Image (tube, rainbow, N blue to C red):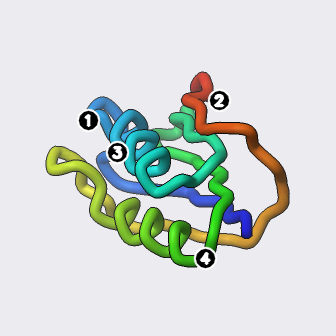
Amino acid sequence: MVRHLDIFGHVQGVGYRYRFMEEAQYLGVTGWVRNRRGGSVEAMIAGTAEALDALVAWARRGPPSAQVERVDVNEAEGKFAGFELRPTE
């Protein structure tokens, strides 16, 4: 399964991407995460339904210093070898 996430709120400059990557790796999820110029965070994640559900639940909370307002989740396609931080787009 693959999902595309758009994460909104105070999610930049608070370690959100790094913690997201750590959580994804812990859960065995592949894909990527990056900041968006407008202040949001975007991610593509692939894995089992259970692992994706757990990562989406984490994304809705984020690290302690983040203030997540909403997470938009959509079905997507793709294959990823590992998990990476991508440059801001």
Residue 56 x, y percent position in the rendering: 46, 67
Q: CA distance from mark 1 to mark 4?
A: 28 Å
Label 4: which residue?
49
The earlier-in-sequence mark between 3 and 2 is: 3
Type of amino acid under label 3: Val
Kindly identify which numbered label has been placed on residue 14.
Answer: 1
The earlier-in-sequence mark between 1 and 4 is: 1
Label 3: which residue?
11
Kindly identify which numbered label has been placed on residue 89.
Answer: 2
The earlier-in-sequence mark between 4 and 3 is: 3
Type of amino acid under label 1: Val
Type of amino acid under label 4: Ala
Tell me if 68 is positioned left or right of 63 in this view.
right
Residue 66 vs 84, above or below: the answer is: below
The answer to whether the residue labelled 1 contacts the one labelled 2, judged by CB atoms less than 8 Å apart, is no
Q: Give me the residue at 45% from left, 40% from top.
A: 21
Quadrant of the drawing holding the N terminus: bottom right
Q: Nearer the viewer, mark 1 or mark 4?
A: 4
